[in-house]
């Protein structure tokens, strides 16, 4: 366990070092409803302009540093997911995107794994149905170590207690 | 020569920072709920757990378990219990650990 954590920290430092300026993203749809893809495409639009942050989409997993996975991991995609992940050069980052990928929408059943974490080693989880382009930008920045995550500090308890 | 080019050379940065200014459209985003522990009773909690379509809510004794990763921000819990549930306004929710998205909210309302 400690070895895992040390390895994870080392990978994170390596990623921050190497991916600090330019990072190529391969998107992988494992059975999503395509709304996550729609938000991901919006990142390229002038309003969000992903490229100004040094992120680029690439059509080839062999050129990709980061795998952006959407959808509930339909089992029919097992082969494609494995090939895509193996084709990526290391160090690589896996980002699970959307409530389906985080296990919120579909249960684990004979047709789908229901959670990206069942199949791939996920580094960053981005909740949302769909996550807005802003949330995706924040998630990508967390993935390359430019931003600290805020989630551990959130309680989701509102004030105004009686 | 364009000014931005000279500025870029002087600062030595090739990209702009994440968000350089607060984003105006963030306020319009649907966001996961926030809960008022003082207004939550076991009955209210069971009601909002029952309407949640994505298993983001569960009740364990006097604790409401909210999994922000499962939440689709549909707003059904806020509609079912408007006194106890509001919108959190949080959208920067990326987490490096899945467990960091599971939150425990105490149920402090009076028993019914």
Image: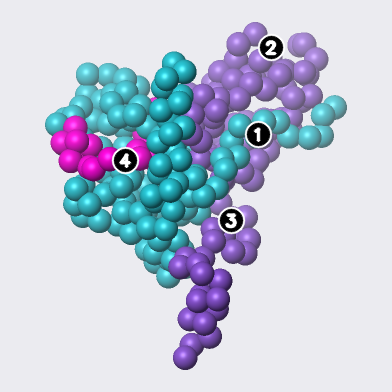
Chain colours: A cyan, B purple
Of the residues tagged 2 and 4, which is closer to the observer? 4
Rendered location of residue A42, percent (x, y): 39, 60
Residue at mark 2 to residue at mark 1: CA–CA distance = 22 Å
Q: Is residue A95 left or right of residue A60?
A: right
Residue at mark 2 to residue at mark 4: CA–CA distance = 42 Å
Rendered location of residue B12, percent (x, y): 51, 69
Q: Read off the residue under disc 1.
A: A153
| Closest to the observer, A109 or A85 | A85
**Chain assignment, label 4:** A
Query: Any magenta on residue A137?
Result: no
Residue at mark 2 to residue at mark 3: CA–CA distance = 33 Å
Q: Which residues are magenta?
A: A82-104
Give the crowd class for mark 2: few <14, some 14-19, many >=20 residues within 10 Å: some
Q: Is residue A82 visible?
A: yes
| Closest to the observer, A114 or A12 | A12
Q: Read off the residue under disc 2.
A: B62
Callout 4 touching callout 3 (CB < 8 Å): no
* Mark count: 4
Question: Secondary structure beneath disc 1?
Answer: helix
Rendered location of residue A155, percent (x, y): 67, 31
Q: Read off the residue under disc 4.
A: A92
| Closest to the observer, B44 or B9 | B9
Callout 2 touching callout 3 (CB < 8 Å): no
Of the residues tagged 4 and 1, which is closer to the observer? 4
Query: Any magenta on residue A89?
Result: yes
**Chain assignment, label 1:** A
Of the residues tagged 2 and 3, which is closer to the observer? 3
Name the N-terminal-most of marks 2 and 3. Answer: 3
């Amino acid at each position: 366990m400690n070895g895992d954590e040390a390895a994870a920290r080392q990978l994170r430092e390596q990623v921050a070092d190497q991916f600090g300026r330019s990072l190529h993203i391969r998107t992988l749809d494992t059975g999503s409803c395509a709304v996550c893809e729609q938000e991901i495409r919006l990142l390229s639009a002038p309003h969000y302009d992903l490229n100004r942050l040094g992120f680029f989409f690439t059509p080839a997993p062999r050129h990709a540093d980061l795998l952006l996975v959407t959808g509930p991991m339909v089992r029919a995609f097992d082969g494609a997911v494995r090939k895509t992940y193996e084709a990526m050069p290391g160090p690589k980052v896996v980002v699970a995107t959307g409530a389906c990928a985080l296990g919120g929408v579909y249960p684990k059943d004979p047709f789908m794994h229901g959670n990206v974490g069942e199949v791939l080693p996920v580094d960053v989880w981005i909740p949302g149905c769909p996550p807005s382009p802003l949330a995706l930008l924040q998630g990508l920045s967390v993935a390359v170590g430019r931003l600290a995550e805020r989630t551990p500090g959130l309680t989701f308890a509102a004030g105004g207690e009686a | 020569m364009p000014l931005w080019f000279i500025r870029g050379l002087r600062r030595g940065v090739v990209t702009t920072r994440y968000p350089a200014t607060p984003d105006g459209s963030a306020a319009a985003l649907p966001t996961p709920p926030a809960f008022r522990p003082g207004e939550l009773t076991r009955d209210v909690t069971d009601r909002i757990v029952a309407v949640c379509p994505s298993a983001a809510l569960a009740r364990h004794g006097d604790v409401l378990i909210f999994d922000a990763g499962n939440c689709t921000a549909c707003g059904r819990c806020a509609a079912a219990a408007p006194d106890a549930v509001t919108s959190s306004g949080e959208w920067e929710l990326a987490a490096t650990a899945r467990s960091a998205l599971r939150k425990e909210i105490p149920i402090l309302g009076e028993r019914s």
